[in-house]
Image: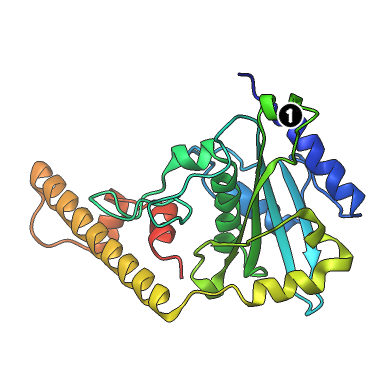
Amino acid sequence: MASIEEKVEDWVKDTLKSYHVRTFSKTEAINEEIDNALKTAPSKQGGTGRNMPDIQCFIQLPNGNHIPVMIEVKGSKGKLEKLDTHNKLHNIQTSGKNAGSPLWKNINDYAANGAVHYAHAILENTTSYTHVIAIGVNDDEQNFQSSSTWKHPEISAWYVSSGNLQEPIRIDNFDFSYLSANFLHSLQEKLRLLSLTESERTTLTKQRENTIENSLIALNEAMHKNLQQQKVGSFYRAGSLLQVFPLHKQIIKGTLRY
């Protein structure tokens, strides 16, 4: 069945307009810092293409915090979000030899996963922003055409912040009215209560430490193999190694999201 992504996107824009929330399209920039962050980060497919969220908003909470809002839209059944076995958004491989690597297919194919990817791009490549709201929206043709039973598109909203180690936390019972001026106090209180437990923080920190250790072991093995092939001596300068084995910034930041 054909995607109705454009129809869903129009619904989101119309809904936000009804709440007097300013929106920024794919080709508009909220500001230079955020625009540069989206350009700097790898694309949703892992390449060097520019990141272009379907819709962006920029809100200011009563406490003065400015929060970018990244919205990604899909228009096919089952494309709202991809979760792992713990019901957490599944953008990063958490186990095995590829632990810490981005799951580009999930990021590209699912609305909420793509929106969180944009949130991470902002947190990792700006200095002004430590909080981002990521929202996935999805609907399908069959539901959209059923005028007698049609319900609003499904929404998956996540709070991503530096204080929570950039771990996405679901915002339950979210609707777009929370972005309107009348409900910003409610949204601020909702976000204040969203934080990792000490157990979750400890588990996540340990998991990422293990990922870093495994990555360093794999890097060392690759260096050793390459040096053997090139018949290079046992002693060398660290600077030379970095030239031989450049590390992609996204891999490092993907494992060091603190």
Q: Quadrant of the N terminus?
A: top right
Residue 225 versus residue 119: which sits nearer the camera? 119
The answer to whether residue 113 shows anywhere in this view is yes
Q: Please, is residue 108 above or below residue 204 in the view?
A: above
Within the image, what quadrant is residue 34 found in?
bottom right
Q: Residues within 10 Å of mark 1 (few under 14, many from 20)?
A: some
Q: Please, is residue 50 above or below residue 132 in the view?
A: above
Element assignment for label 1: helix
Q: Residue at x 82, y 42 (%)?
A: 13
Within the image, what quadrant is residue 69 found in?
bottom right
- Left or right of 69 in this view: 80: left
The residue labelled by disc 1 is 144
The x, y position of residue 224, in whole percent, is 12, 52
Q: Please, is residue 203 above or below residue 233 in the view?
A: below
The x, y position of residue 134, in whole percent, is 64, 55
Residue 164 versus residue 242: which sits nearer the camera? 164
Residue 255 versus residue 96: which sits nearer the camera? 96
- Left or right of 57 in this view: 73: left
The answer to whether residue 53 shows anywhere in this view is no
Q: Residue at x 58, y 41 (%)?
A: 80
Within the image, what quadrant is residue 173 found in?
bottom right
Total numbered labels: 1
The x, y position of residue 257, in whole percent, is 45, 65
What amino acid type is highlighted by mark number 1?
A: Phe
- Left or right of 34 in this view: 208: left
Q: Residue at x 75, y 24 (%)?
A: 145
Q: Please, is residue 77 above or below residue 2 in the view?
A: below
**Residue extending farthest front:** 148
The x, y position of residue 71, in whole percent, is 69, 48
